Each structure stands twice: as C-alpha cells, then as structure tokens.
Image: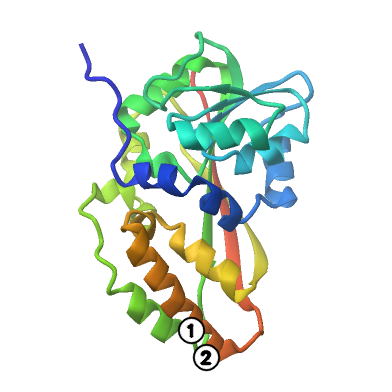
Amino acid sequence: MDAPPRIDPLAEAFAGIAEAYDRARPDYDSEPIDWLWGELDLGAGSTVVDLAAGTGKLSRALARRGGTLIAVEPQGPLRDLLERRAPEATVLDGTAESIPLPDGAADAVLVGEAFHWFDGDRALPEIHRVLRGRGGLALIWHNGRWEGPWSEELFARLDQVPTPDVRPENRPHTNLWQRAFERCELFDPLQRETFARVLQLSVPDAVDLITSWSYVAARPAAERDELRVELAEILHRHLGDAPVEIDYRTAIDVTRRRP
C-alpha cells in the first residue's frame, strides 16, 4: 500500500502565517482567469476544483464566474480562512495525491502556485481520475521582477536568510516539476499563456509579500519580525513614501485529460 500523502515541511510554514499570507499575496487578476475560463470551455454548469486552495485567493476569483466550485486544502488554519473568504465554495480536506472526490467529478482542476509542492507522479493520476472526458488542468504561476536601485541591497539581505534543504522540485523556477508531466501519458503537452501587469505596493505591503515566501515564513517569528524591520528600512531609504513597483507576470500552463 502506498504511504499516505505528506505535506512538504516547508509548505507547512504557510499554516503559521495564514492571515499574513492572505493579506500579502496579490489577488488573481480577471484577465488571465477570463482567458482560462474560455480556453477550458467552462460555464455555469461546470464543476471546477481549486486544488491546494490555501486561503482561497484563487477560489474568490473563480466564485464570481458561477458553476460549482470545490476547494481542496490539507492544512487546517488555511482551510478555516478559506471557508470564510470563499463561502461559495465547498471546502474539503485533502491533498493533490489523495483528492476526496469520486471518479469523473470535475470539468477542470486548477492549481494556483502550488503544483511544485506536489508529488507529481502521484498527483497527476489522481487529477486524471477526478476529471471527466477531456477535462482541463491548469497551473497558474505568479512571478514578479523586483528591480530597482533598492533591489541589490534588499536581496543581499534576503540572501542571508537560511534556506531550508528541500526537494529541487519545490523551487518553481527550476521547472523540475515539469518532469512529472514528461513521464506521464495521461495528459496532453502543457501549453503556456502569459499575462502582464504592474503591481504598486506600499512598503509595508511589499514587506508582507516577501515575508510570505515559504523560506522566510519558515523562520521563527522573532527572526521574521527583525527581518521585517530591516527590509522596511532598506525600502524607505531608497523610495521614501513612493510605492514599490513590480513587473508582475501571470503564467498559465494548460493541458487536457486524455481519456
């Protein structure tokens, strides 16, 4: 019998900062979600699963589009907030490797900034199981370019933060998570679409976002508090009260289930 699915220890750090995570992470812009809705032929009669839903950032964007929304999240503190933030969703306790739904229950499975935490070789057959027909799977990624006269000093400080030893696949920028798709014949090849926008964040909001990153969130609370002060001082020194501008990209990898 397979071992029960286990949440990556670094991902578990999000449970300890649920409110801060929800406050800090940018909302999902309407343009990429509108595009995805059309690309996957979703509508009012569709059942959509938000897998590894976290605090419900993606679920809130999906709920406005109608249909049946199911949000699956394994961590209790995140799930509690999800239920309050996205009351339209049916919220379930489960993982990508063990989805608590019957076969063929969904028209689409969407994963917001989380597939790199999955055991892809176990998650893809499970996602295939809960999809029906030529149902769609979409992976949504956010990536910001933190560039400016302040960035060198900011990231020099962040480079001093100890980085936990994690699976290389847990680092989304390595793209090693894609290897599970290369080994899997259950889905069509991934196709990518990218959308751009500019985020303007106050210094406190920028610091909140940085401290929601997993390797920072995993540090002890006292260390995070000290880091927050230092990062804010760096940004204020360079920017004063001006906003932090970040070129933001939303990339969506889309595929469809092979019957």
How far across and down, in percent of the image, does residue 10 sit?
31, 47
| Total numbered labels placed on residues in the image | 2
How far across and down, in percent of the image, does residue 192 sit?
54, 48
**Which one is in front, 225 or 98?**
225
Q: Which residue is mark 2?
A: 237
User: Hey, which quadrant is residue 6 in on the image?
Assistant: top left
Q: Is residue 86 left or right of residue 218?
A: right
Three-letter code, disc 1: Glu
Q: Is residue 55 above or below residue 246?
A: above
**Residue at (45%, 76%) from the top-left corner?**
229
Three-letter code, disc 2: Arg
Residue 228 visible in rendering: yes
In the rendered structure, find residue 233 and report the number of the disc placed on it. 1
Q: Residues within 10 Å of mark 1 (few under 14, many from 20)?
A: some
| Screen quadrant of the N terminus | top left
How far across and down, in percent of the image, does residue 104 sit?
55, 11
